């Protein structure tokens, strides 16, 4: 039983009964696809972001830091990556998080695991994947993302590159035991509601445009049109996808619906996954901001390791999901 | 009383500073709102999320932009403590 079946009924009724468009026609098909996806995605966004925000109000980064500073390095890379999922991430929070973690004694590798997982496995991307690609692809994305985050952190930890962090970072010790202001249940609900509305306000134009172009591609571009250029047999598909993804971070919400349509037209699944991971995990503005606290060499190292992890994932799933 | 807004200088923090100034003015308090862009000061308070509204050196609201009423309530709560 398809959970979204009622939405399909509604979309069918709107397009074929109310607007009197012919089913199976190009226009009818595209508009139906658009309405169905838009309703589905916005419902999912509203519900899931609300739930995640409630959980998050119990687990602010300050609490996560206390958890991470206590654990041993190997388990903490895993825990850091998992906690990264529920933490929102914008490039302007990268510096306080980085400094706060390091100064409270969280190892560099663990900090990097968190910095990889937090933007890559965020709830907006996951909802879009779930809504447009189905739960299997969403799950593959989460698991590969976690593996990349844990391994990148572990490698950076092993390399002992603390000398590539700007020395001033280690000169202060952050106060790790500050009492956070307490929140009542009502305040948590208000916070979750406001946060959900904020995110929706921020992403809705991108999602509408993304799904709109996607719907057009769905109706008008012949199936397998792109297979020639970006099918799984093409070796350059994956690295190209990663490079194109780097500057697109702020538009992740619009990019995912767009790629979902491209996948239908022959772009292979591994290449698509690699592209989405690159969009979310490798962000140019974040790198530029991190320059304040670490040497360029460490940023390249970080981007290189994550980039290789993403490419490996891309090739792997191009191979498996043929 | 010391009312401070701490942030990295990002748009969210600027907005909190503006709303807090309005709140203080509407409450008829004589205090100036101090705007601190030094991230280390946030860290010294034990926090990592920005923006922060702190009253008398203690964080009152952390990590999001509250409604003006919530800011007034938070300041009121700190006064009565």
Image (cartoon, coloured by chain):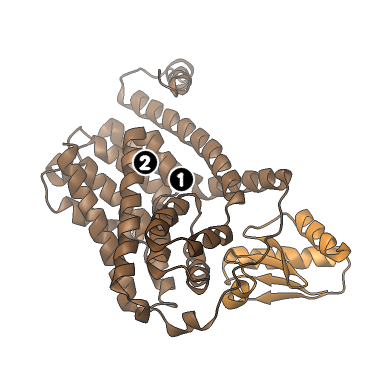
Chain colours: A brown, B orange
The numbered mark 1 sits on a residue in which chain? Answer: A
Q: What residue is pinned by disc 1?
A: A124
Residue A36 in the figure: left or right of residue A160: right
Mark 1 closeness class: few <14, some 14–19, many ≥20 residues within 10 Å: many
The total of numbered circles placed on residues is 2
Find residue A283 and report its horizontal and vertical position in percent. Answer: 37, 62
Q: Please state which of residues A86 and A3 is positioned toward the viewer in this rendering.
A: A86
Looking at the rendering, which quadrant does residue A176 occupy?
A: bottom right
Frontmost of labels 2 and 1 is 1
Q: Secondary structure at mark 1?
A: helix
Q: Please state which of residues A145 and A156 is positioned toward the viewer in this rendering.
A: A156
Residue A17 vertical placement versus A233 (above, below): above
Find residue B59 and report its horizontal and vertical position in percent. Answer: 70, 66
Mark seen at residue A195: none
Q: Do the residues at pointers 2 and 1 share their chain? A: yes
Q: Answer with mark 2 or mark 1, whichever residue precedes in sequence.
A: 1
Q: Please state which of residues A47 and A10 is positioned toward the viewer in this rendering.
A: A47
- The quarter of the rendered structure image containing the N terminus of chain A is top left
Q: What residue is pinned by disc 2?
A: A257
Q: Secondary structure at mark 2?
A: helix
Mark 2 closeness class: few <14, some 14–19, many ≥20 residues within 10 Å: many
Look at the numbered discs 2 and 1 and tell me whether their residues touch, using CB distance below 8 Å.
Answer: no
Find residue A158 and report its horizontal and vertical position in percent. Answer: 30, 69
Looking at the rendering, which quadrant does residue A73 occupy?
A: bottom left
The residue drawn where x is 46% and y is 35% is A41
Residue A210 vertical placement versus A181 (above, below): above
Find residue A122 and report its horizontal and vertical position in percent. Answer: 44, 49
Distance (Cα) linking label 2 and label 1 = 12 Å
């Amino acid at each position: 039983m398809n959970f979204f079946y009622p939405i399909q009924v509604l979309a069918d009724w709107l397009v074929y009964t109310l607007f009197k468009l012919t089913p199976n026609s190009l226009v009818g098909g595209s508009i139906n696809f658009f309405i169905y996806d838009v309703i589905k995605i916005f419902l999912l966004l509203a519900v899931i972001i609300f739930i995640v925000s409630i959980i998050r109000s119990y687990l602010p980064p300050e609490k996560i830091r206390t958890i991470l500073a206590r654990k041993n390095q190997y388990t903490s890379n895993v825990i850091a990556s998992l906690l990264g999922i529920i933490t929102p991430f914008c490039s302007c929070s990268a510096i306080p998080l980085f400094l706060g973690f390091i100064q409270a004694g969280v190892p560099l590798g663990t900090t990097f695991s968190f910095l990889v997982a937090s933007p890559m496995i965020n709830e907006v991307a996951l909802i879009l994947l779930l809504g447009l690609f189905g739960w299997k692809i969403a799950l593959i994305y989460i698991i590969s993302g976690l593996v990349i985050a844990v391994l990148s952190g572990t490698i950076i930890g092993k390399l002992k590159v603390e000398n590539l962090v700007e020395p001033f970072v280690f000169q202060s010790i952050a106060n790790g035991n500050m009492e956070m202001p307490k929140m009542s249940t009502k305040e948590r609900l208000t916070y979750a509601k406001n946060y959900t509305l904020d995110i929706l306000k921020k992403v809705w134009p991108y999602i509408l445009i993304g799904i709109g172009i996607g719907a057009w591609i769905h109706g008008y571009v012949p199936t397998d049109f792109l297979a020639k250029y970006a099918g799984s047999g093409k070796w350059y598909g994956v690295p190209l996808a990663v490079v194109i993804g780097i500057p697109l971070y702020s538009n992740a919400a619009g990019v995912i619906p767009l790629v979902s349509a491209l996948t239908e037209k022959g772009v292979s699944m591994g290449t698509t996954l690699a592209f989405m991971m690159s969009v979310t995990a490798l962000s140019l503005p974040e790198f530029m901001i991190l320059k304040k606290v670490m040497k360029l060499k460490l940023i390249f190292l970080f981007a290189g390791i994550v980039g290789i992890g993403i490419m490996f994932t891309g090739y792997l799933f191009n191979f498996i999901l043929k | 009383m010391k009312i401070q807004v701490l942030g990295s200088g990002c748009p969210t923090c600027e907005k909190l500073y503006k709303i807090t100034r309005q709140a203080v003015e509407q409450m008829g308090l004589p205090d100036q709102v101090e705007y601190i862009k030094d991230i280390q000061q946030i860290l010294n308070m034990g926090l990592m999320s920005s923006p922060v509204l702190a009253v008398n050196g203690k964080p009152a609201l952390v990590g999001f932009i509250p409604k003006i009423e919530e800011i007034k309530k938070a300041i009121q709560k700190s006064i009565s403590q």
